[in-house]
Image (cartoon, rainbow, N blue to C red):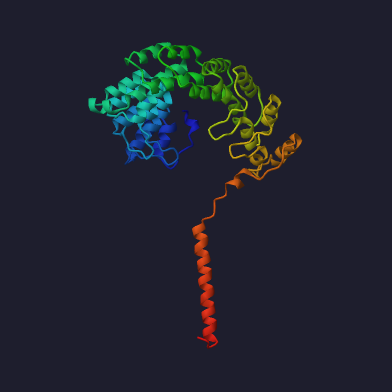
Amino acid sequence: MAPDEIEPMVDAPLLEAVRTGGLEDVRRQIAATSDLDARGHAYGYTALELALALGRVDVARLLLDAGADPNAPSPNDTDALTVAIEEFAEAAHPLIDLLLDHGARPTDAALWAAAQAGDLWAVDRLLAALSAESASSRDLEALEGALLAAAVRRGDAALFERVRARSDEMSANSLQWAFEAAADSGQSGMWGRLRQLGEPDLPRALQSAALAFLRNGTPAQYDLLRRITREAGPDAASRLFAFAVTCGLDVSDRTEALLTLARECRGDLEARDASGMTALLMAADRHHIQHMRRLIALGADRHVRDLAGRGLSAHVERWPQSVRLAEARAYLAELGVPTERPAASQHAVPRDPTGLAVLLGLAIGVGVLAVVLLLHGLGLL
């Protein structure tokens, strides 16, 4: 983080001195400040945390020597160690040593930040700074899973082997996390290494790979997506039709690549998700008209119905405020699809017969009372 990325903090002289001032400016403000650990309103940093975020080691050391608390309480679980690790990753090692030497207590947030950064040194350094009881209470399996996933994302074979060597056997959760990291980042080599350690949940990995490819579209991501799709088989390949039409309004080279891959791997264009929706019904429900046209061109059934018997029109009519409603209606008319009631209107809450009976009883009671009062007024009672 650079000083100009932070707005001036004129209402917090110490923080402003840390942001832009020299050491003498900071010393003067330390002498004039009663609370070194006060947090700025705009960013929530203490002066020490701000110095760490800016990489001002000399200022951080000055504040620590003056009595700044590296464990200052925070409403949002911010702490000095976590700030240093999140800002500088492996370049934070001198800052970690400095803070630990001044009494910083490793938090779960700091350990997690180090693990997600793939910083094995920092994880071990933080764990070593804890008591044996405190260290053993941490979720070491989750930390190793995060480390392994970080190694996979970076394609760091050396770190991968070092993390793997820490345990006789990696847990299923850690392996799945790593498989999904490989799928997301397009690390085919790491996918192969992981396959030697265990079996992935292929549908979950396929989802990670498909969404990552739609997001970034790198050749490496596509190559691994294709490999996973082939391993997963036709049922999983069928899900690519849905991914292609639900993750973006327009047809693109990336959605076309997914549709082509789904067909290449014998995916079923009429496959349904857990709620009974096909890819075409999903596209209609979202008014993704270009995708509807593309699926129809590929042979999707325009007369398809969901499990409740509702067709394309019912799902198009579900969103009357949509700016694409008129265009969607026109396309269905072009297809010759009959108009239906909106899908939502067919989920009306059934009337409560008990409530109706109570209302009827009250009405009869009021009527009887009115008759009695009338007869009494006429002197007949």
Relative to 302, residue 364 above or below: below
The residue at 66%/25% (across/down) is 252
The residue at 46%/22% (across/down) is 201
Does residue 301 appear left or right of residue 120 in this picture?
A: right
Q: Residue furthest bottom?
A: 379
Q: How many marks?
A: 0
Does residue 31 appear left or right of residue 245 in this picture?
A: left
The answer to which image quadrant residue 111 occupies is top left
Q: Residue furthest right?
A: 334
Q: Residue furthest front?
A: 380
> x%, y% of residue 234?
56, 20
Relative to 68, residue 57 above or below: above
Considering depth in this image, is 231 or 15 the residue closer to the camera? 231
Task: Answer whether residue 287 is visible to the viewer in this image.
Answer: yes
> x%, y% of residue 228?
52, 17
Does residue 94 appear left or right of residue 202 in this picture?
A: left
> x%, y% of residue 168?
32, 14
Task: Answer whether residue 90 is visible to the viewer in this image.
Answer: no
> x%, y% of residue 134?
26, 28
Considering depth in this image, is 275 or 369 the residue closer to the camera? 369
The answer to which image quadrant residue 221 occupies is top right
Considering depth in this image, is 279 or 378 the residue closer to the camera? 378
